């Protein structure tokens, strides 16, 4: 009611301002209350709206006045060309996965799960409790809240193999999301101009973080079973690299999961090379027909630096991740984190800890595989029926995405544009390759909104493939 009344007053005053000279005094609040038969609160809200729109200015103890129209002139930022010099930051556009889609399209491009797959009730309650706690005014330790550090350490420790020592809470550094953690790890463990081995294809955000850190990315071919061990060993030997970034469980974008034997081979290569494996366990909570088994659970010698984010599984508003590193590596990563952000919001940490400490969190996780499987299978079946010329090399046992291979004759940028023109937004696979792509791929997110539209999306993709 107040919003409707204030909008009516704003509209009337905008008409009056359009004919009034700059500096003209607006009618007093008492006069406006009488003219519009509104409360003083409603009138004050209307005046605040006009101030925020730059139409009105107030003078304490005097009143409100029509603000002079600003002089519009072209901006000249040419001087910044010399001041900034050559750019050493990637000029690539933001990833398709971050685009916000209108409601009237079918969105298969996003990098986040639909809110129906999130513990929304737990998150809302946790924010309410955090708002009433000391977290709203306190400064947390640089490494993170001790109880949250202990939770991440316990979670990883529960997966440790026989004879492998569990990490301690001190080994954990809390970050504002995995992107920040990747940047800190790359800076601390690789350094400017140092070589970083990565799977190809791999997570586009890791490629971006490496570029921002000035790290030289070296691709290692990776397929449905993970990276080629021989190629990985050769890359370590040729480049002298001391770090390998990988996603052993439900890799983004391919969905690949390493077999235990593959994990042992990769870990053995890293040990013989005196190198780190930076393990990104991004989909730990999104297993469907298989569980995520961290590579870090096989190592207590500090070769594996382990990263797990809660942003996708808890809420996009709760950007909290835990990075676990042992020995001097942990200290260097913490120093890098402190230089960038000093500490992570205590409120967000308190919310994350609250959510994952609730019994209902485990109940929520137990229901996720069934929900994800239904969405994944619906999209897989629809693609196989309506887009038979596209190829799925494997159906992932977890994660959020399908990695769809298109025929080589397809002109990918044009195909993606045609899909969007037809009301289906897809993500071109080129973004996930650190160098030239090895084929035409789409990354399709089956965890997004409106899964009932998946058959229609598949029909659109199949029809456009026939045309191309």
Image (tube, rainbow, N blue to C red):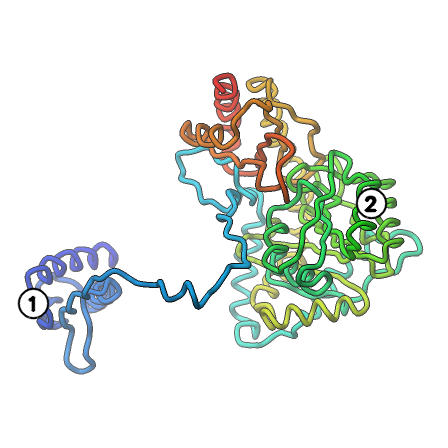
Observer-side mark, 1 or 2, equals 2
Q: Check disc 1 and report the residue beneath it.
A: 21
Q: Estimate how packed mark 2 is, as few (under 14), some (14 to 19) or many (20 or more) residues with alpha carbons within 10 Å.
A: some
Labels 1 and 2 touching (C-beta < 8 A): no
Which picture quadrant has residue 169? bottom right
The image shows residue 180 at horizontal and vertical percentages of 61, 60
Above or below, 349 against 198 in this view is below
Q: Is residue 333 left or right of residue 132?
A: right
Q: Residue at left 18%, top 65%?
A: 71
State the residue in front, 3 or 265.
Answer: 265
Q: Residue at left 65%, top 54%?
A: 309
Q: Is residue 446 visible?
A: no
Q: Quadrant of the N terminus?
A: bottom left
Which type of secondary structure does the marked residue at label 1 adopt?
A: loop
Q: Is residue 234 left or right of residue 59?
A: right
Q: Which mark is residue 445?
A: none
Q: Which mark is residue 234?
A: 2
């Amino acid at each position: 009611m107040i919003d409707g009344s204030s909008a009516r007053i704003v509209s009337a005053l905008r008409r009056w301002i359009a004919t009034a000279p700059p500096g003209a005094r607006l009618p007093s609040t008492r006069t406006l209350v009488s003219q519009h038969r509104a409360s003083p609160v409603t009138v004050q809200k209307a005046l605040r709206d006009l101030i925020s729109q730059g139409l009105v200015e107030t003078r304490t103890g005097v009143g409100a006045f029509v603000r002079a129209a600003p002089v519009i002139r072209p901006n000249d930022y040419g001087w910044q060309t010399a001041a900034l010099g050559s750019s050493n930051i990637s000029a690539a556009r933001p990833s398709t996965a971050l685009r916000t889609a209108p409601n009237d399209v079918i969105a298969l491009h996003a990098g986040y799960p639909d809110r129906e797959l999130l513990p929304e009730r737990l998150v809302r309650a946790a924010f309410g409790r955090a708002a009433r706690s000391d977290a709203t005014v306190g400064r947390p330790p640089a490494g993170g809240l001790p109880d949250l550090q202990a939770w991440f350490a316990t979670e990883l420790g529960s997966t440790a193999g026989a004879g492998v020592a569990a990490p301690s809470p001190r080994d954990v550094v809390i970050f504002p999301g995995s992107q920040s953690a990747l940047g800190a790890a790359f800076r601390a463990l690789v350094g400017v101009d140092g070589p970083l081995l990565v799977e190809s294809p791999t997570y586009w955000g890791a490629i971006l973080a490496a570029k921002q850190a000035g790290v030289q990315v070296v691709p290692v071919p990776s397929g449905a079973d993970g990276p080629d061990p021989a190629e990985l060993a050769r890359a370590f030997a040729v480049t002298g690299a001391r770090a390998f970034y990988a996603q052993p469980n439900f890799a983004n974008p391919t969905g690949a999961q390493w077999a235990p034997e593959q994990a042992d081979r990769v870990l053995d290569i890293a040990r013989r090379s005196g190198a780190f494996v930076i393990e990104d366990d991004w989909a730990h909570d999104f297993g469907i027909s298989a569980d995520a088994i961290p590579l870090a659970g096989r190592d207590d010698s500090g070769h594996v630096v382990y990263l797990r984010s809660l942003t996708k599984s808890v809420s996009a508003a709760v950007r909290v991740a835990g990075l676990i590193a042992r020995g001097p590596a942990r200290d260097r990563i913490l120093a890098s984190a402190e230089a960038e952000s000093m500490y992570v919001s205590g409120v967000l940490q308190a919310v994350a800890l609250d959510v994952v400490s609730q019994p209902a969190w485990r109940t929520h996780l137990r229901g996720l595989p069934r929900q994800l499987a239904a969405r994944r299978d619906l999209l897989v079946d629809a693609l196989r029926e309506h887009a038979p010329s596209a190829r799925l090399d494997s159906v992932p046992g977890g994660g959020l995405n399908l990695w769809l291979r298109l025929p080589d004759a397809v002109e990918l940028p044009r195909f993606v544009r045609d899909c969007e023109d037809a009301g289906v937004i897809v993500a071109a696979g080129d973004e996930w390759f650190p160098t030239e792509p090895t084929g035409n791929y789409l990354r399709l997110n089956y965890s997004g909104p409106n899964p009932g539209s998946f058959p229609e999306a598949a029909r659109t993709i199949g029809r456009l493939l026939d045309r191309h």
